[in-house]
């Protein structure tokens, strides 16, 4: 699927804080490598390149829309010899490095910085056909990597999993208090017809809430949609397994910066960073408290309001 012409401009969250956080220990003249494990709209990668001419980027993204759009951006900027973009999940970063970059990275397999900007880009939310948002009607998909033939979609989960399985997923990944009611109503509704679209699911969830809670600050469907996205893409499991792998690819004074957007992600990053610091004396958590967006950034980009940045350094 190629949606280059429809790829929405992505506003990079905590842009200055990420650039400074990773480049703070940069020797201005020496060629250095940074790994951007979630390329997305390319904002952070471009920012690193524009900040320092001796930076090169290994970039990954599992979404083909981001890859196609990114290749166009790289060509337009004439950065083909500075940004190297791969279609892959960041869980495979070590294999990609060992297969393609050992002859370029000096010393071997060591990066000045590694960035992970978690969650969903504005493009995913705004493209209704991707199924990430209940604000736009579209196919109930939610897969980041739509070309993976073995992946399951949210539609598969909603229409084939048992009531207990659905309730457990919605509670575990969405921290949804009405998970059992929502799961029961999904199973009842799909007896009539297969649930196909985001709006169909949103309507079921909306009416699963008590009427007095349906007009609250947070839309009733928010947590369930989050849960399905996290489950379908195995985001939390992959994140937990990748943090230590990424940390070991850092050079001395290299930094791993991770931006999370909700408590489940942030909890994993916080605990894993602490565990790495405790078990491995060569690592130190730089951010005892997460860095959050300033009020000016939140005014410019409301979606940044829940972002938290944590940084780990190899000392």
Image (tube, rainbow, N blue to C red):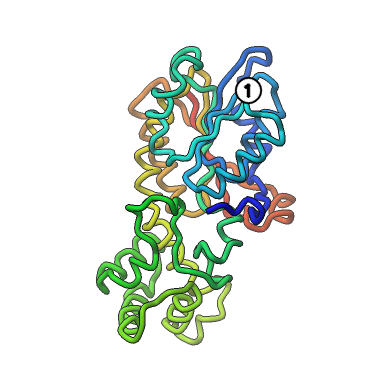
Q: Relative to 73, is 145 on the left or the right?
A: left
- Which residue is drawn at the image coordinates 50% and 46% (left, top)? 118
Residue wearing tag 1: 55
- In this view, 204 is above or below 171: below
- x, y percentage for residue 4? 63, 50
Compare residues 141 and 262 and report the one nearer the observer. 141
Mark count: 1
- x, y percentage for residue 150? 32, 52
- x, y percentage for residue 129? 53, 65
- Which residue is drawn at the image coordinates 47% and 23% (left, top)? 250
Mark 1, residues whose alpha carbon is within 10 Å: few (<14), some, or many (≥20)?
many
Compare residues 117 and 65 and report the one nearer the observer. 65
Compare residues 250 and 10 and report the one nearer the observer. 10
Instruction: Say whether residue 127 is visible.
Output: yes
- Which residue is drawn at the image coordinates 44% and 76% (left, top)? 201
As helix, strand or loop, the secondary structure at mark 1 comes to strand
- The quarter holding residue 83 reads top right
Instruction: Say whether residue 277 is visible.
Output: no
- Which residue is drawn at the image coordinates 42% and 29% (left, top)? 96
Compare residues 301 and 201 and report the one nearer the observer. 201
- In this view, 121 is above or below 26: below
- In this view, 140 is above or below 30: below
- x, y percentage for residue 132? 50, 63
Q: Relative to 192, is 251 on the left or the right?
A: right
- The quarter holding residue 28 reads top right
């Amino acid at each position: 699927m190629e949606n280059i012409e429809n790829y929405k401009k992505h506003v990079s969250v905590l842009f200055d804080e990420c650039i400074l956080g990773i480049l703070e220990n940069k020797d201005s003249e020496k060629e250095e490598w940074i790994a951007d494990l979630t390329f997305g709209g390319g904002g952070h990668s471009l920012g690193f390149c524009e900040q320092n001419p001796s930076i090169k980027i290994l970039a990954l993204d599992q979404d083909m829309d981001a890859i196609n759009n990114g290749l166009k951006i790289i060509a337009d900027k004439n950065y083909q010899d500075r940004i190297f973009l791969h279609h892959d999940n960041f869980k495979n970063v070590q294999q990609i490095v060992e297969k393609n970059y050992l002859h370029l990275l000096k010393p071997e397999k060591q990066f000045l910085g590694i960035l992970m900007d978690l969650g969903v880009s504005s493009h995913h939310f705004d493209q209704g056909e991707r199924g990430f948002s209940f604000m736009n009607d579209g196919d109930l998909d939610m897969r980041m990597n739509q070309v993976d033939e073995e992946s399951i979609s949210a539609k598969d989960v909603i229409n084939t999993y048992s009531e207990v399985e659905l309730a457990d997923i919605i509670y575990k990944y969405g921290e949804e208090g009405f998970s059992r009611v929502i799961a029961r109503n999904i199973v009842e509704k799909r007896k009539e017809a297969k649930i196909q679209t985001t709006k169909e699911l949103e309507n079921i969830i909306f009416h699963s809430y008590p009427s007095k809670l349906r007009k609250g600050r947070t839309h009733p469907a928010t947590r369930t949609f989050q849960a399905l996205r996290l489950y379908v893409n195995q985001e939390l499991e992959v994140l937990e397994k990748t943090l230590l792998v990424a940390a070991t690819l850092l050079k001395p004074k290299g930094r791993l910066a991770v931006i999370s957007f909700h408590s489940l992600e942030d909890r994993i990053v916080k605990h894993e960073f602490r565990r790495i610091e405790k078990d491995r004396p060569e690592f130190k958590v730089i951010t005892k408290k997460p860095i959050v967006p300033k009020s000016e950034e939140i005014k410019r980009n409301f979606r940044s309001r829940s972002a938290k940045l944590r940084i780990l350094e190899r000392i």
